Image: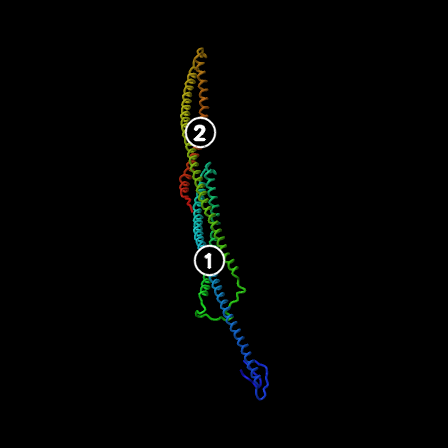
């Protein structure tokens, strides 16, 4: 309590002003003491209320602090658990993408081998077509082996084109897989770093070293940063994109596997058909050659018989000519008979008849000789034609058997 020139001051507050004469009365003394007592009680009550409010506020704020810390701790655990869950999910997809990359690399190698294996067969088929152009005569024909080789060549060229398209698609698929794996790896690193950051922040306590208030500039404003729902949506999109890419890649590998299987089956079937066509054609050529050789043998025998017949006819003509000469000589001698003895007797008539018969016979023999010679020349020409036809067959057999068959044996269809 303090006084200041007639003004009574109590804890700095102004009270009612009391004027004193030279001395105070008891009433004044009592009033003053009563007023001081009331002021003291009021202030104590105010202090008690303030202390109660302070303790209540301290308890309340402590409860709020503990609740907030528990809530933050729960959110830390939940957030770290969410991040760990997605790290595990994306890590599975990362490994699956890695396996898919390895498998795609294997299929690229298989497609490269399949495409490369087609080139030697195409080269062989083109060489076969070129060699078969050396066939001559009637054998230079678009026969079944020729058709099968052309069909085989077309199949090879079409398969080569499809293989190259699949190879380009496989390389593009591999590029997309590697790009996605790179992006996914970056996302995994970010999430692992975020989990480490949150784990570090979670492990910091109030009394840990370097715990201090931060300046407002350090506290980042997150009002314009994506929220948790958007984060989860973007993270799920990685998983969905990975699943879609894996399905697409798997479907493509199934398609490539089917193509390689069908390619092998179709090429094996076509090669077998072409080889069978060559075998059948060789049998047909050999059969035709055997028939021609048999016919040539028969013609050769006919020529020999005709030569014998010509010799016999010529000999017969000479014999008839000698007989005619004899008859004519006899007739000429008998023309020398004298006078009455020059008579057309029976002998003369027989001589005349014999001479006429000999002339007719000789004429017939000459006609027969001419016809036989004409037929002989024709059969000789036919013999030459047969020999030429046989040579054509020999040439065809030499090409298809000696040249083509070894080339066909070089063709090997392997599974890729």
Give the secondary structure at mark 1. helix
Quarter occupied by residue 202: bottom left
Mark on residue 290? none
Q: Position of residue 212 (x, y in %)?
A: 47, 71
Most extreme residue toward the top, as rendered?
340
The one nearer the camera, 187 or 266, is 187
The one nearer the camera, 88 or 51, is 51
Q: How is the image coloured?
A: rainbow
The one nearer the camera, 205 or 257, is 205
Q: Is residue 316 above or below residue 121?
A: above
Give the secondary structure at mark 2. helix
Q: Residues within 10 Å of mark 2 (few under 14, many from 20)?
A: some
Numbered disc in front, either 2 or 1: 1
Q: Residues within 10 Å of mark 1 (few under 14, many from 20)?
A: few
Q: Position of residue 12 (x, y in %)?
A: 55, 81
Q: Position of residue 27 (x, y in %)?
A: 57, 83
Q: Position of residue 345 (x, y in %)?
A: 44, 12
The one nearer the camera, 77 or 115, is 77
Q: Is residue 286 above or below residue 62?
A: above
User: What residue did someone put label 1 on?
Assistant: 85
Most extreme residue toward the bottom, as rendered?
22
Q: Is residue 128 above or below residue 297?
A: below
Q: Are marks 2 and 1 in contact (CB under 8 Å)?
A: no
Distance of label 2 from label 1 (alpha carbons) = 100 Å
Most extreme residue toward the front, as rendered?
26
Answer whether residue 166 is visible to the viewer in this image.
no
Mark on residue 379? 2
Closer to the N terminus: mark 2 or mark 1?
1
């Amino acid at each position: 309590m303090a006084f200041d020139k007639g003004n009574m001051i109590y804890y700095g507050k102004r009270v009612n002003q009391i004027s004193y004469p030279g001395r105070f009365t008891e009433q004044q003394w009592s009033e003053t003491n009563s007023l001081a007592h009331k002021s003291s009680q009021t202030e104590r009550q105010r202090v008690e209320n303030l202390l109660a409010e302070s303790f209540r506020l301290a308890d309340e704020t402590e409860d709020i602090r503990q609740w907030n810390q528990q809530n933050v701790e729960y959110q830390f655990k939940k957030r770290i658990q969410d991040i760990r869950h997605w790290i595990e999910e994306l890590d599975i997809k990362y490994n699956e993408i890695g396996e898919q990359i390895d498998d795609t690399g294997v299929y690229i190698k298989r497609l490269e081998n399949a495409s490369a294996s087609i080139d030697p067969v195409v080269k062989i088929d083109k060489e076969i077509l070129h060699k078969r152009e050396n066939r001559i005569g009637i054998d230079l024909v678009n026969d079944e082996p020729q058709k099968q080789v052309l069909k085989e060549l077309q199949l090879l060229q079409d398969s080569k084109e499809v293989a190259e398209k699949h190879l380009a698609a496989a390389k593009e698929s591999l590029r997309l897989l590697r790009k996605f794996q790179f992006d996914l790896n970056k996302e995994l690193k970010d999430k692992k770093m975020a989990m480490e950051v949150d784990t570090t922040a979670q492990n910091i306590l109030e009394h840990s070293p370097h715990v201090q208030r931060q300046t407002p500039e350090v506290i980042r404003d997150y009002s314009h940063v994506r929220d948790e729902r958007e984060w989860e949506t973007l993270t799920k999109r990685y998983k969905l994109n990975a699943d879609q890419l894996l399905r697409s890649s798997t479907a493509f590998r199934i398609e490539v596997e089917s193509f390689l299987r069908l390619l092998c089956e179709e090429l094996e079937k076509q090669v077998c058909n072409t080889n069978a066509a060559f075998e059948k054609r060789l049998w047909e050529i050999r059969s035709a050659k055997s028939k021609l050789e048999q016919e040539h043998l028969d013609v050769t025998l006919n020529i020999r018989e005709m030569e014998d017949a010509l010799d016999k006819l010529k000999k017969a003509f000479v014999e008839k000519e000698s007989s005619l000469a004899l008859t004519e000589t006899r007739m000429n001698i008998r023309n020398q008979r004298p006078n009455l003895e020059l008579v057309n007797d029976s002998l003369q008539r027989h001589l005349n008849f014999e001479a006429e018969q000999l002339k007719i016979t000789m004429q017939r023999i000459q006609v027969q000789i001419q016809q036989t010679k004409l037929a002989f020349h024709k059969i000789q020409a036919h013999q030459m034609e047969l020999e030429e036809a046989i040579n054509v067959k020999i040439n065809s057999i030499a090409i298809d058997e000696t040249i083509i068959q070894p080339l066909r044996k070089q063709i090997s269809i392997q599974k890729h």
